[in-house]
Image (cartoon, grey):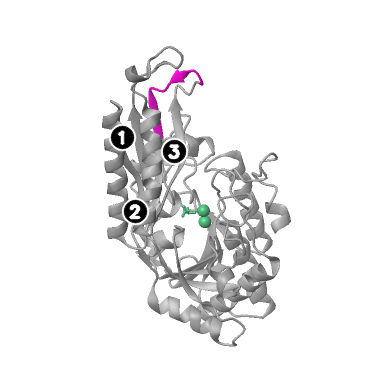
Amino acid sequence: MWRDLSPLGRHADSGGYRRYAWTGADAECRAWFEDQAAARGLACEVDRNGNQWAWLGDPAASDAVVTGSHLDSVPDGGAFDGPLGVVSSFAALDELRRRGARFAKPLAIVNFGDEEGARFGLACVGSRLTAGRLTAEQARRLTDGDGVTLPQAMEAAGFDPDAIGPDPERLARIGAFVELHVEQGRALDLTGDAVGVASAIWPHGRWRFDFRGEANHAGTTRLADRRDPMLSYAETVLAARREARLAGAVATFGKIAVEPNGVNAIPSLVRGWLDSRAADQQTLDTVVSSVEKAARDAAAEHGVDLDVVRESFTPVVEFDHALRDELARILGRDARLTAPVLGTGAGHDAGILSESVPTAMLFVRNPTGVSHSPAEFAAEDDCAAGVLALADVLEGLACP
Ligand code: HGY
Ligand code: MN
Ligand code: MN
């Protein structure tokens, strides 16, 4: 499965993936998913929001056990973030069939669309729409860096944007959703475990800072006469690091857009995106408001205007305690695994669904902790341990 999937959407220069929602690379990954489902005799359907569901058993029956993840990536993302969960789901089904497992409940493997939000700026669009945590109207307003709206992108990819919206009937039929994901951190490397169970996801969000100054000539404009937004932006980036360090949180300015973006032109506009996350809501609020205050002070100092817009937000996720404990019990059963329970700062579709469906996550060791990078890696033995753990969990949940 990896051999078929790994070339799709991979960029030759960086070795990273550029699998953005509703692009050609996305379509190739969707076709791969359909092939894997068909090869296993699974009925593959696409829901109104473009998420793919491969079913074993009757989708209309209740109490389905669902597993899966996403196939899209961040710009130049790694091979495992998302795909490991989808590949492991198909491999876990193969393992259960090898064991002769008999399913008492429907099983589905899902590929949630646009989890990373790399193109339209909002994370987990597919699962948010289905869970009713993003309205169709809000989604239709999403626009990519080239001014293409989400409806236009969906239509160009052959999907009906008028169909998008909440799908409570679908979610009501799900008894449990378990997402396997490569760990995006080094906790398992430090504990020496191949597999872990998620406890919670930190609250996190994305804020856009628009610094508007005055375009002018880089060579002839006296420093005292400038209204340079780049300086306000730079001071804000440094403030974000300072405030995060003081609060024991994280804050990142990883994306910037400059107009007119000329070497010899003082910018008229500098647009920067802040990603910030913290163990609790109050800390996150403190960090973001401190960064915004620093940004306003810097803007005032340089005669620059500032707008701050919250573009994406996910409150803290406490995974279902009963399901979390059931996973830990199943994995600890034959002592093959001592699967520690650990929190994460990374967002996931499982987090979005957790308000509507009992959800849980399994993490597979990432020896370097590196993610959202072409260098992301997980050892084959650990990936195999993840498949066996997922198979044990699915068997425990669907084949009692
Ligand atoms: O940003 C995240 O935490 C996730 O990878 N979408
Ligand atoms: Mn990711
Ligand atoms: Mn992911």
Is there a contact, CB below 8 Å, between mark 1 and mark 2?
A: no
Q: Which of the two discs, 1 and 3, sits closer to the camera?
A: 1
Q: Is residue 88 above or below residue 153?
A: below
Q: Which mark is residue 124?
A: none
- Magenta segment range? 263-271
Q: Residue flagged by tag 2: what amino acid is it?
A: Arg
Q: Residue flagged by tag 3: what amino acid is it?
A: Leu
Mark with earlier residue (1, 3): 3
Q: Residue flagged by tag 1: what amino acid is it?
A: Ala
Residue beneath disc 1: 298
Please, what secondary structure does the residue beneath circle 1 have?
helix
* Residue 267 lies within the magenta run: yes
Q: Nearer the viewer, residue 266 or 204?
A: 266
* Residue 75 lies within the magenta run: no
Alpha carbon separation for disc pair 3 and 2: 17 Å
Residue beneath disc 3: 150
Alpha carbon separation for disc pair 1 and 2: 35 Å
